[in-house]
Image (cartoon, rainbow, N blue to C red):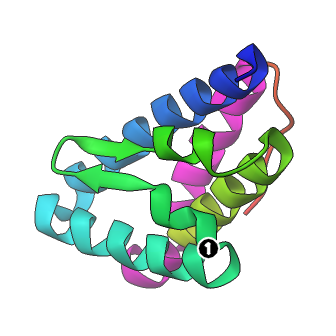
C-alpha cells in the first residue's frame, strides 16, 4: 500500500467527516444517515467498489476502499460520492447551503495541495 493512497484516504476521510457534521447540524443524525445511505447506493451504481464505504452515527469512512481500488480509481469513487451527496443536498436543503458545503470541500482539498473539485 502506497503512502500516497493512505494520504488520499486520510484527506477524504477528514473531509467526509467535516461534511458529516455539517449535515447533522442542518438536518439531524437520522436524516444524515439516510442521505449517506442514498449517496452510497448511487455511487455503487457506477462503482461497485463503493460498497466498501462505511458509515454510522460516528461518521463516514473510506478506509475500506484501500483494498478495493487503485489510487486513481479511488479518487474517482470518492469524487462521485461527494458529487452525489451535494446533488442530493441541493434538492433537499437548497442551492445556497449546498454551494457553501461544496465551497468548503474545495477549500479543504486545495489546502491539502489537491485539485479543486466543482459541483
Magenta run includes residue 110:
yes
Of 13 and 21, the residue lying toward us: 13
| Position of residue 13 measured from the top left corner of the image (x, y, whole percent) | 49, 35
Q: Is residue 5 left or right of residue 96?
A: right
On the image, which quarter does residue 115 sit in? top right
95 in relation to 81, above or below: below
Residue 37 visible to an observer of this rendering: yes
**Quadrant occupied by the C terminus:** bottom right
Please state the horizontal and vertical placement of residue 9, each as a whole percent of the image: 60, 32
- Magenta segment's dominant SS is helix
Residue holding disc 1: 48
The local crowd at label 1, few if under 14, some if 14 to 19, many if 20 or more residues have their Cα within 10 Å, is few
Question: Is 107 covered by the magenta stretch?
Answer: yes
Where on the picture, by quarter, is residue 5?
top right
Q: Nearer the viewer, residue 39 or 111?
A: 39
> In the shown orientation, is residue 27 left or right of residue 68?
left
Q: Quadrant of residue 43?
A: bottom right
Local SS, label 1: helix
On screen, residue 74 versus residue 30, left or right, reads: right
Q: In the image, what residue occupies the spot 19% across and 41% down?
A: 58
Amino acid at each position: 500500500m502506497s503512502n500516497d493512497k493512505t494520504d488520499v484516504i486520510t484527506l477524504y476521510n477528514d473531509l467526509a467527516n467535516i461534511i458529516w457534521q455539517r449535515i447533522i447540524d442542518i438536518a439531524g443524525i437520522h436524516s444524515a444517515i439516510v442521505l449517506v445511505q442514498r449517496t452510497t447506493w448511487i455511487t455503487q451504481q457506477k462503482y461497485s467498489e463503493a460498497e466498501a464505504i462505511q458509515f454510522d452515527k460516528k461518521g463516514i469512512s473510506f478506509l475500506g476502499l484501500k483494498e478495493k481500488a487503485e489510487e486513481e480509481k479511488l479518487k474517482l469513487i470518492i469524487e462521485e460520492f461527494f458529487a452525489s451527496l451535494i446533488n442530493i443536498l441541493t434538492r433537499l436543503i437548497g442551492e445556497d447551503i449546498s454551494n457553501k458545503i461544496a465551497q468548503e470541500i474545495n477549500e479543504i482539498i486545495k489546502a491539502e495541495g489537491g485539485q479543486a473539485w466543482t459541483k
